């Protein structure tokens, strides 16, 4: 019993954070925006430690199953959250806004993500998706200008209700057919089927569609772009960086643990989502003049790239997609760090034209952004090239030339879109004044670049060592 | 021994280059001449005592492309070098004594380098050395004239000549797979595109020696000083052209029509140049006409028998220098007399005698049995030229009375010359081929052609300068520029920039604006994407059927 | 200690270290800029020393090649493999020397900014990697890696006004890179990671071979301004107003030539080689086209670009000819070619700077500036193909081969060479034609130190004709 409580310590720590922060919020007089971020940082460290200690222990394996595989994905997400929390505190300090609710909601979403990564049954999956949607909805309201976000928030609720609804329905139907919510049981049931009736197909599609919505794959990606357009910068960074790895982990778990017998039916579906995301993401990036929205589109594109890369969801596919996702997230984390430096007269800039000639005044930030952008494009010899190469090389090896061709063409389009950013920052002159960025931004960028450079010269840690875990467990 | 001479001269030239900074360093020119004298003295004294040796530096080691830097001593080379050394020494002397020459040392260095390159050219055994020496001579020729127009004409003309030679040798190499000049005889049996090669080589040589109408570069020397003209004619490209002719004669013989074309071309050049001498008022142009006519004749003779270059023709060049020098002196005096109302008639007569005397002495120095009837041709031509000079130029400043007198004695000199020619022509045991007979016949007619007829030809030659200028601008530059501009307009600007790029930009802008519209935060967009997504999913589930 | 490997890696790393030093320098004053260029010069000279050592090693080994391998990915067969042979080292040497010239002259023109130096060093590192790479992945990495610094150099330091052309340039080059990536992945699928020497020997008789070789050739031709795509390169090259940047951009097509040189097989069967006639036709037409445009264009920069393009296409045709002698001589020819065009560009840029600084016409400048006149004349003579540099031999071989194969094409090629040469000659004559409007005089002549550098180039060119490997005593 005690062991189960101990295994559940990450989740318990999340709950403890709520309690502690509520107490601090209520009783501490000299609280600043930084207070809750400091608190959350310590709790996060504790959560990371607990996750590491109980990396393959599960309290209720039928519902939540921790494996080294899921732990790896969780750790990456937590570390990104830790870094982003640290940077977000600078935003709150600069704006001098209360951070209690934001931090608490982040931890709500963290709970959802924690459950999602370990989910081994359909109710757990549904609950996680619901918590995440709820947290996202609440987070968007953290904007000081409520009117600006109301439409997006309301429509998001409608979307969420629909997708959670179909997820519940599909879960219920599968339970009705197989007699269990557990992935393994459903997988058994599905493997006994010779043909797929329409109802089963609908169920599979419903589950995948709900996950795709949560992951912001096109054509259900509009919430993501508009959240980033309307939301505050800390929210944008958070929804870009943190949920990715865990959603991917949940998708892989679901596909491998539950829907594997239906792979022939589901793989083209995933490919279609991937294709849609790649096209709409790449072209959408061209259409945006708002830098954050542009990168939101890039995020959708990268997700599509990963979905296409998942291919048949074999071990090598997963390894390739993992490598790609890590490189992408590192680059995106870098980009969002630089966003915090785009500041003029205390206001954070997001319009492309406002950043004309940024390079002349802030060369280091611009250079860092350049590295991250080229890494996102996948140009050699940046780290992004390895992630990019791992997916393409995998597709070539399995003779998926069509997919490879699509990815190459989309990479070309997205490169053009990102080139606009480079052009604006480097090649167009402007006399705008920019605020001096916080030292913490430089520190984070330095660490990020060090990771990138180290990975560049010793990519084995990324491709080989970490993925031995994936290969051994998946 | 030739190698020593070659290296010694290069060292002198390089040393002189280092000190050639300012103008009018005449003393350095004298020292240069002294150094040259010392070197040539040793060369000439050891000429027959040392065996024929050579200096060979292996340059490209490949089997098919074996190129050596070869300076070898041979009988031919020695017989070529002796008169050339004389020409070089005289030319440098001219540079020194010419008071109007501000860059005597520089010009002397260039003459020296030209001489060195002629040695290199004459001793070439492969294509690369041949092209190398010939090209460097072209570069040097570019620096000798003062006027930019002359330089421009020289450079463009010689560049085209070098390029033609280069392409011809490329084609030859493509056929026989070797760059050795010794293996060129295979070209007649193995070669492809023989006509093309011969045309290119003829073009190249014609540019170098100045056959009509490719002699515009020499005519543009009308404002140059005498010493520079001499340097350009006697120590640079014309001689290089003749040497190349001897080296590549085998290629020229690979087609049957070469000798006929050469004969006709030379004849045309001679006639036109005679006209130029008659019509022109400029001494330099007359001199150029004279040189061109004589060199065209040398070309004809060398084409008949390449060995002729190494003894009679090279000596004849020396003779030409003497003749030119005397003409120059006569001209200078006549100018002076015109200004000072000097009694020119008698003095001019005296001076006028000098050139034919020197000419005859020079010819008598030669081995008559060897040069045979060609010698007659030289005298013949010389007589004609002298006639032209005396009748038109020397008396141009004088009164009409003296004009008739001048004409009279000039005709006498000409008749003496012609007599000498006939003497040679009817020399016992001399037989002439049909072609040579025709040539002599034509020349004979020319000399008795009325001056007015020749004037037309001369006008044509002088007009050629404007024509070639017009040709260069209107028929070469203008169409090339026009085509270039047209191509840029049609392809780069209309097709690519305004066609492809503008279309892509327009369509992509439309797509982008559509996406911008559908991506903004509006309820319609949310519903649109949602409905499209759901529709696609349903379609997928139903296998493409609704 | 593996000295060859260390030396090979150092050729890539030394410029990178130099770049880091440059980046760490302060910015703002002339003194700082001098420091930056000093660092760049030292890095270049150090690298030239390393290259010299490599030449010496080749001589010592009495074989023309050094091959070393660096295991990069521990678990994969993707590794870094390096090779050094006479041709690649010659090309590398010329690139170094001419970039060194560009840097030295940028001091004279006071435009040696930090970004210029750092991106130049990055470019140098990439091109060093390209010339010594021995396997397909290393090759691709450096091939693509050249794009970033060259693009940034054009955009930031090229004084470039028309940014739409820059878009086209970037996308066009990227298309070439992506096509090459597809080809490389294909090769990888066939045989795993292979050395370029192995690619060279792949049988062209297989059914897929024409397609593969077609793609490879196409990808490399994207770097070379072949009709009708020359526009994208021409529109950028001709508008760059910085000698160093122009040199870098001019070296870029060399990567395509070098790629073909390394990849193109020894023997191509008749079924494929019959299509070469089309490549020859396109090449010869492009040459004629560009030479005519260059001739009609009054801009000296465009004229030089036309000249460079013509020669690159000629080298391209030379490689397609599969003549062993042409291949053997290519390194020597490129050595001379790069030195000539680089030096010409430096001098043209110098004249342009003097022209704009003194608001005078440059016509007649060479009449008064003796040093400049001598150098410019020599370079023009060398450029038009006179036998005073190593370019001559290769011109001779390529022309003789093409004429013996097809007299019409050969004549076209010769014609375009003549037109391009006339273009350069007319530019020389223009500068030598005295004009009263020209206020430039002896005081604007080349300073003695810079003249000495140019004399060094002249010496190297002459030696390249007589004995290219004089510096190692062969």
Image: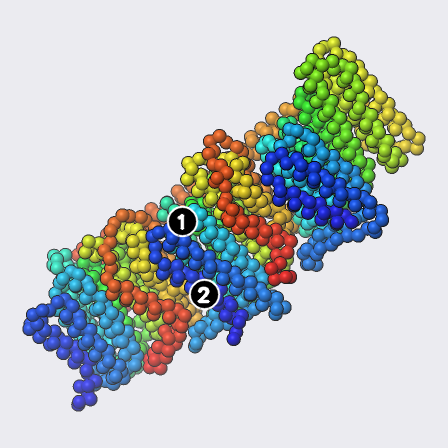
Residue C13: numbered disc: 2
Q: Name which residue lies at 22% across and 66% down.
A: A87
Percent across and percent down for residue B2 are 77, 48
Which element type, helix, strand or loop, lies under badge 1? Answer: loop
Residue C127, relative to residue C69: is it above or below?
Answer: above
> Extreme top residue here?
B401
- Mark nearer the N terminus (2 vs 1): 2
> As drawn, is C385 to the left or to the right of C245?
right
Q: Residue at x 35, y 51 (%)?
A: C29
Quick one: C45 or C249, which is closer to the camera? Answer: C45
| Mark 1, other Cα within 10 Å: few <14 / some 14–19 / many ≥20 | some
In this view, the residue farthest toward the bottom is: A1
Q: Which residue is labeled 1 in the image? A: C111
- The residue under the point 64% across, 61% down is C474
On the image, the x and y values in percent for residue B460 come to 66, 23
What residue is drawn where x is 15% and y is 66%?
A139
Q: Is residue B430 above or below residue A265?
A: above
Taking the image as shown, residue A331 lies to the left or right of residue B86, namely: left
Residue at the extreme right of the image, as rendered? B428
């Amino acid at each position: 019993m005690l062991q189960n409580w101990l295994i559940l310590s990450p989740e318990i720590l999340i709950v403890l954070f709520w309690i502690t922060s509520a107490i601090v919020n209520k009783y501490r007089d000299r609280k600043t925006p930084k207070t809750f971020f400091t608190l959350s940082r310590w709790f996060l460290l504790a959560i990371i430690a607990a996750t590491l200690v109980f990396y393959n222990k599960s309290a209720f394996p039928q519902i939540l199953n921790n494996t080294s595989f899921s732990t790896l994905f969780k750790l990456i997400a937590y570390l990104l959250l830790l870094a982003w929390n640290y940077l977000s505190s600078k935003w709150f300090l600069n704006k001098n806004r209360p951070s209690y609710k934001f931090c608490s909601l982040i931890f709500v979403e963290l709970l959802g993500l924690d459950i999602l990564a370990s989910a081994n049954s359909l109710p757990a999956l549904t609950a996680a998706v619901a918590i995440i949607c709820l947290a996202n909805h609440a987070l968007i309201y953290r904007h000081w200008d409520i009117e600006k976000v109301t439409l997006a928030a309301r429509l998001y609720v409608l979307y969420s209700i629909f997708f959670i609804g179909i997820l519940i329905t599909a879960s219920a139907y599968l339970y009705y057919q197989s007699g269990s919510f557990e992935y393994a049981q459903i997988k058994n049931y599905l493997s006994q089927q010779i043909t797929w009736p329409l109802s089963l197909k609908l169920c599979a599609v419903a589950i995948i569609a709900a996950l795709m919505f949560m992951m912001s794959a096109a054509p259900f990606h509009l919430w993501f772009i508009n959240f980033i357009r309307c939301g505050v910068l800390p929210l944008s960074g958070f929804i870009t960086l943190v949920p990715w790895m865990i959603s991917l982990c949940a998708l892989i778990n679901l596909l491998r643990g539950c829907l594997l017998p239906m792979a022939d039916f589901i793989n083209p579906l995933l490919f279609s989502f991937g294709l849609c995301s790649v096209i709409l993401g790449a072209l959408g990036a061209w259409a945006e003049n708002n830098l954050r929205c542009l990168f939101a589109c890039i995020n959708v594109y990268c997700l599509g790239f990963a979905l296409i890369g998942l291919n048949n969801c074999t071990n090598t596919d997963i390894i390739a997609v993992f490598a790609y996702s890590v490189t992408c997230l590192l680059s995106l984390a870098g980009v969002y760090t630089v966003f915090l430096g785009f500041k003029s007269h205390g206001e954070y800039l997001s319009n492309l034209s406002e950043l004309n000639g940024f390079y002349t005044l802030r060369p280091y930030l611009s250079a860092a952004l350049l590295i991250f952008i080229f890494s996102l494009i996948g140009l050699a010899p940046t780290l992004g090239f390895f992630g990019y190469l791992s997916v393409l090389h995998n597709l070539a090896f399995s003779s998926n030339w069509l997919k490879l061709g699509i990815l190459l063409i989309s990479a070309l389009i997205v490169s053009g879109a990102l080139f606009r950013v480079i052009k604006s920052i480097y090649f167009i002159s402007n006399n705008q004044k920019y605020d001096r960025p916080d030292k913490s931004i430089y520190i984070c960028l330095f660490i990020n670049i060090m990771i990138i450079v180290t990975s560049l010269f010793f990519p084995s840690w990324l491709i080989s060592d970490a993925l031995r875990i994936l290969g051994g467990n998946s | 021994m030739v190698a020593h001479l070659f290296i010694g001269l290069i060292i002198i030239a390089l040393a002189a280059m280092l000190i050639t900074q300012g103008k009018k360093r005449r003393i350095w020119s004298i020292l240069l001449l002294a150094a040259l004298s010392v070197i040539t003295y040793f060369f000439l004294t050891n000429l027959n005592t040392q065996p024929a040796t050579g200096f060979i530096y292996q340059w490209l080691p490949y089997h098919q492309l074996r190129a050596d830097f070869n300076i070898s001593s041979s009988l031919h080379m020695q017989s070529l070098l002796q008169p050339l050394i004389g020409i070089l020494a005289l030319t440098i002397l001219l540079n020194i004594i010419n008071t109007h020459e501000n860059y005597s040392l520089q010009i002397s260095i260039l003459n020296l380098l030209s001489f060195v390159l002629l040695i290199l050219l004459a001793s070439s055994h492969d294509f690369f050395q041949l092209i190398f020496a010939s090209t460097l001579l072209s570069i040097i020729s570019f620096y000798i004239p003062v006027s930019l127009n002359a330089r421009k004409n020289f450079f463009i003309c010689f560049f085209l000549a070098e390029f033609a030679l280069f392409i011809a040798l490329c084609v030859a190499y493509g056929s026989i797979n070797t760059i050795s000049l010794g293996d060129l005889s295979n070209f007649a049996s193995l070669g492809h595109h023989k006509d093309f090669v011969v045309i290119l080589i003829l073009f190249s040589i014609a540019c170098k020696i100045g056959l009509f109408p490719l002699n515009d570069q020499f005519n543009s020397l009308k404002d140059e000083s005498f010493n520079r003209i001499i340097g350009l004619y006697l120590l640079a490209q014309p001689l290089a052209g003749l040497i190349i002719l001897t080296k590549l004669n085998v290629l020229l013989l690979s087609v049957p029509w070469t000798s006929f074309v050469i004969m006709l071309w030379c004849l045309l050049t001679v006639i036109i140049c005679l006209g130029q001498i008659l019509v022109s008022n400029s001494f330099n142009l007359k001199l150029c006409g004279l040189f061109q006519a004589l060199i065209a004749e040398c070309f004809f003779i060398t084409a008949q028998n390449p060995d002729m270059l190494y003894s009679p023709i090279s000596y004849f060049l020396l003779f030409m220098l003497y003749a030119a020098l005397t003409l120059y002196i006569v001209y200078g005096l006549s100018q002076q007399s015109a200004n000072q109302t000097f009694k020119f008639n008698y003095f001019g007569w005296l001076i006028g005698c000098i050139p034919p005397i020197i000419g005859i002495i020079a010819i008598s120095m030669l081995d008559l049995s060897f040069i045979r009837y060609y010698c007659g041709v030289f005298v013949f031509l010389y007589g004609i030229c002298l006639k032209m000079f005396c009748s038109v130029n020397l008396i141009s400043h004088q009164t009409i009375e003296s004009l008739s007198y001048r004409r009279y004695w000039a005709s006498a000199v000409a008749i003496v010359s012609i007599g000498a020619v006939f003497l040679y022509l009817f020399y016992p045991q001399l037989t002439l081929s049909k072609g040579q007979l025709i040539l002599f016949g034509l020349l004979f007619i020319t000399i008795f052609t009325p001056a007015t007829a020749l004037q037309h030809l001369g006008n044509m030659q002088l007009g050629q300068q404007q024509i070639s200028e017009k040709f260069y601008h209107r028929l070469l530059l203008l169409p090339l520029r026009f085509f270039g501009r047209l191509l840029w307009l049609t392809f780069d600007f209309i097709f690519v920039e305004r066609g492809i790029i503008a279309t892509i930009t327009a369509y992509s802008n439309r797509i982008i604006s559509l996406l911008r519209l559908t991506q903004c935060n509006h309820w319609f967009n949310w519903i649109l994407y949602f409905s499209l997504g759901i529709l696609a999913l349903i379609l997928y589930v139903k296998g493409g059927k609704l | 200690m593996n000295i060859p490997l260390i030396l090979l890696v150092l050729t890539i790393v030394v410029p990178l270290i130099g770049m880091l030093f440059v980046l760490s320098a302060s910015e703002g004053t002339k003194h700082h800029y001098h420091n930056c260029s000093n660092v760049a010069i030292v890095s270049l000279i150090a690298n030239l020393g390393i290259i010299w050592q490599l030449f010496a090693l080749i001589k010592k080994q009495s074989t023309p090649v050094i091959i070393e391998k660096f295991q990069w990915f521990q678990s994969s067969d993707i590794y870094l493999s390096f090779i050094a042979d006479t041709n690649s080292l010659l090309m590398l040497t010329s690139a170094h020397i001419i970039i060194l010239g560009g840097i030295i002259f940028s001091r004279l023109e006071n435009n040696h900014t930090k970004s210029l130096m750092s991106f130049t060093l990055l470019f140098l590192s990439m091109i060093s990697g390209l010339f010594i790479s021995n396997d397909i992945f290393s090759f691709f990495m450096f091939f693509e890696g050249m794009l970033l610094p060259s693009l940034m150099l054009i955009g930031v330091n090229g004084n470039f006004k028309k940014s739409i052309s820059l878009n086209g340039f970037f996308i066009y080059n990227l298309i070439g890179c992506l096509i090459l990536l597809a080809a490389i992945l294909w090769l990888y699928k066939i045989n795993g990671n292979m050395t370029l020497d192995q690619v060279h020997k792949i049988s062209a008789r297989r059914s897929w071979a024409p397609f593969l070789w077609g793609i490879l050739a196409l990808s490399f031709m994207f770097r070379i301004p072949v009709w009708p795509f020359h526009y994208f390169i021409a529109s950028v090259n001709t508008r760059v107003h910085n000698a160093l940047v122009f040199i870098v951009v001019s070296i870029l097509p060399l990567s395509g030539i070098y790629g073909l040189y390394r990849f193109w097989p020894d023997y191509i069967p008749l079924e494929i080689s019959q299509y070469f006639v089309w490549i020859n036709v396109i090449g010869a037409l492009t040459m004629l086209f560009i030479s005519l445009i260059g001739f009609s264009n009054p801009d000296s920069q465009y004229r030089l670009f036309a000249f460079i393009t013509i020669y690159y296409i000629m080298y391209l045709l030379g490689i397609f000819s599969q003549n062993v002698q042409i291949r053997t001589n290519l390194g020597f020819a490129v050595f001379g070619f790069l030195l000539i065009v680089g030096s010409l560009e430096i001098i043209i840029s110098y004249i342009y700077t003097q022209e704009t600084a003194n608001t005078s016409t440059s016509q007649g400048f060479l009449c008064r500036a003796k040093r400049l006149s001598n150098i410019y004349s020599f370079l023009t003579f060398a450029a038009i193909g006179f036998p005073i540099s190593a370019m001559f031999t290769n011109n001779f071989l390529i022309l003789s081969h093409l004429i013996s194969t097809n007299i019409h094409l050969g004549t076209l090629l010769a014609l375009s060479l003549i037109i391009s040469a006339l273009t350069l000659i007319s530019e020389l004559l223009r500068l030598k034609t005295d004009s009263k409007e020209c206020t430039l005089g002896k005081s604007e002549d080349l300073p003695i130190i810079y003249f000495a550098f140019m004399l060094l180039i002249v010496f190297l060119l002459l030696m390249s004709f007589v004995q290219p490997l004089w510096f190692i005593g062969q």
